[in-house]
Amino acid sequence: MSTRLVHAARPHRTPGAPLNHPIEVASTYHAGGESDYARDGTLGTAALEEAVGELEGGFAVAFSSGMAAACAILDLLGNDAVVVTGIFTYAGVAGRMRQLCDAGRIRLRRVDLTDTPVALEAVDGAQMAWIETPSNPMLGVSDIAAISQAAHAGKTLVVCDSTFATPLGQRTLDLGADIVLHSGTKSLGGHSDALLGLAVTRDESLAALLRERRTLLGGIPGALECYLILRGMRTLHLRHSRAQDSARILAERLSQHPRVRRVHYPGLPTDPGSALASRQMNGPGSLIAIEYDGDAEETEAVCLRTQLWAHATSLGGVESLLERRRRWEFESPEVPENLIRLSVGIEDVEDLWADLDAALRG
Ligand SMILES: *Cc1c(COP(=O)(O)O)cnc(C)c1O
């Protein structure tokens, strides 16, 4: 996989050819060729899609953000379609689902998808099952293979948001999902400098439908963004394994910390998702959630005290970030007020620990 990441979708090795695809800045093209108009995709989009498609083993469709990809997928639903979703789903996706539901477009079945028997029952008669595993921000783990198997018995389309896992941490399509979604903004890009989304499927006609949505809804990524995400992917393997190694160490130490009530991290043997994660994932990833021993205000103060960890939203970058998720009005009310989500970067783990420990102690 690390070799693939470095070599996927390079230009042909002809003398004088560049090793990277140029950033092609054009909205329109001379008629009669392969490209006509950039909203249908460009050479830069195609290169990124080739690399991600190779990585996931499917047809990738790139969008201007993870949300643009999510909305194109939801746009596939017919009127009155039943959609099964978890209690903890990325707040933007949950918000859009609620809007569609309030407008009478779809019906939502919001259940605990980390409880497999509940999940299997819920998918019965649904048109779409929307899994997010590990989930944002609670790090809950859902059984992709079991849910996909039950869903497919009833022709339910399975979508899995694997942004937290990355393509290295989870072989989502192999496990049975029909579409895997990634916010490329996060670990794929890895440098907190570009927005992009990806939907990948093994069904060519489904990919064509998503491409058509992209053209008509207009969610095409820009040339610079495609370049930045592909460039970021070249080092994904190194960044992912370094951040994950540090996250393991930090999660362990946090679970012993006097000011931390609870740690949510599928890499801890005591975590409810750990057994499933060790079967389903190649490592628990680099996101941790902790419940601080304090109220909302005291928890917020921890995030303001760190010197090295940046108090910022988003995740999967080289720099470590933390935030209290409930500072966002749109975050699900089931998320505890004292929950801090930590995105572990690639800095020295002892520096990260010293800063975090001091901020937690106050
Ligand atoms: C950030 C995120 C998204 C949305 O992606 P954007 O690129 O910000 O639009 C979707 N799902 C998850 C799990 C995310 O973390």
Image (cartoon, grey):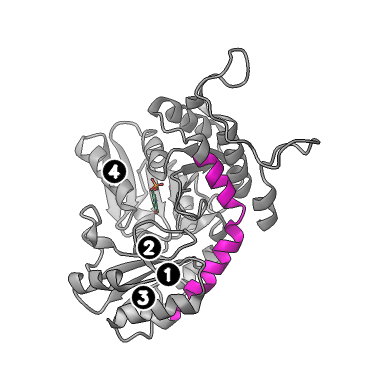
Above or below 225: residue 301:
below
Disc on the earlier residue, 2 or 3: 2
Q: Earlier in the sequence, mark 1 or mark 3?
A: 3
On residue 154, the disc is none
Q: Nearer the viewer, mark 4 or mark 3?
A: 3
The residue where tag 2 is placed is 114
Residue nearest the viewer, comparing 215 with 266: 215
- Could you give the CA–CA distance between mark 2 and mark 3, rounded to whole angstroms? 17 Å
Pointers 2 and 4 in contact (CB under 8 A)? no
Marks 1 and 2 in Cβ contact (< 8 Å): yes
On the image, numbered disc 3 is attached to which residue? 263
Q: Position of residue 182 (x, y in %)?
A: 47, 48
Q: Residues within 10 Å of mark 3 (few under 14, many from 20)?
A: many
Q: CA distance from mark 4 to mark 3?
A: 29 Å
The span shown in magenta is 225-252
Amino acid type assigned to the residue bearing label 1 in the image: Gly
Does the CB distance between marks 2 and 3 fall below 8 Å?
A: no
Magenta highlight on residue 227: yes
Mark sitting on residue 273: 1
Q: Is residue 284 placed above or below 148 in the rendered structure?
A: below
Q: Mark 3: which secondary structure?
A: strand
Query: Which residue occupies the foreground of this view, 313 or 56?
Result: 313
